[in-house]
Amino acid sequence: MNIQEQMKLDMTKNLALLLMENNLGMTMEQAISVVMNSETYQRLQNDATHLYYQSPRYVYDFLDKELKLGKVV
């Protein structure tokens, strides 16, 4: 596993933790499912975006807007 793949995994975990923190009662399994089925996750996996270099809260803002608006802004 290269460093970028590890950073993507760490970001996915951190996004799930932030999602749980902001949605009390959500389980880790539910949070990971939400993250991995999002457009934000697809962008995170795209090396060209370099989202994995950003802070988890910055990337979470994209996810939060996507969940509230139905699309990434």
Image (spheres, grey):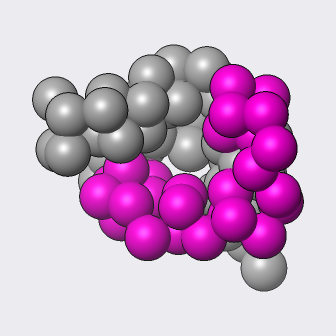
Q: Is residue 54 above or below residue 36?
A: above
Is 66 colored magenta in this rendering?
no
Task: State left or right for residue 34 relative to residue 15.
Answer: left
Task: State left or right for residue 36 relative to residue 73.
Answer: right
**Viewport quadrant of the C terminus:** top left
Main SS category, magenta section: helix
**Viewport quadrant of the N terminus:** bottom right
Q: Quadrant of residue 64?
A: top left
Residue 14 visible in the shown view: no
Q: Is residue 14 above or below residue 4?
A: above
Position in image of residue 3 (x %, y %)? 74, 60
Depth order, front residue of 41/45: 41
Position in image of residue 39 (x %, y %)? 30, 58
Position in image of residue 41 (x %, y %)? 44, 59
Q: Quadrant of residue 17?
A: top right
Depth order, front residue of 34/23: 23
Depth order, front residue of 9/17: 17
Task: State left or right for residue 54 relative to residue 70.
Answer: right
Is 22 colored magenta in this rendering?
yes
User: At 20% from the left edge and 34% from the top edge, which residue is drawn?
Assistant: 69
Residue lying furthest front in this view?
25
Q: Which residues are magenta?
A: 19-47
User: At 37% from the left edge and 50% from the top edge, which residue is drawn?
Assistant: 40
Q: Quadrant of residue 20?
A: top right
Position in image of residue 60 (x %, y %)? 53, 30
Q: How many marks?
A: 0
Q: Is residue 12 above or below residue 73?
A: below
Residue 63 visible in the shown view: yes
User: At 29% from the left edge and 39% from the top edge, which residue is drawn?
Assistant: 66
User: At 42% from the left edge and 38% from the top edge, which residue is drawn?
Assistant: 63
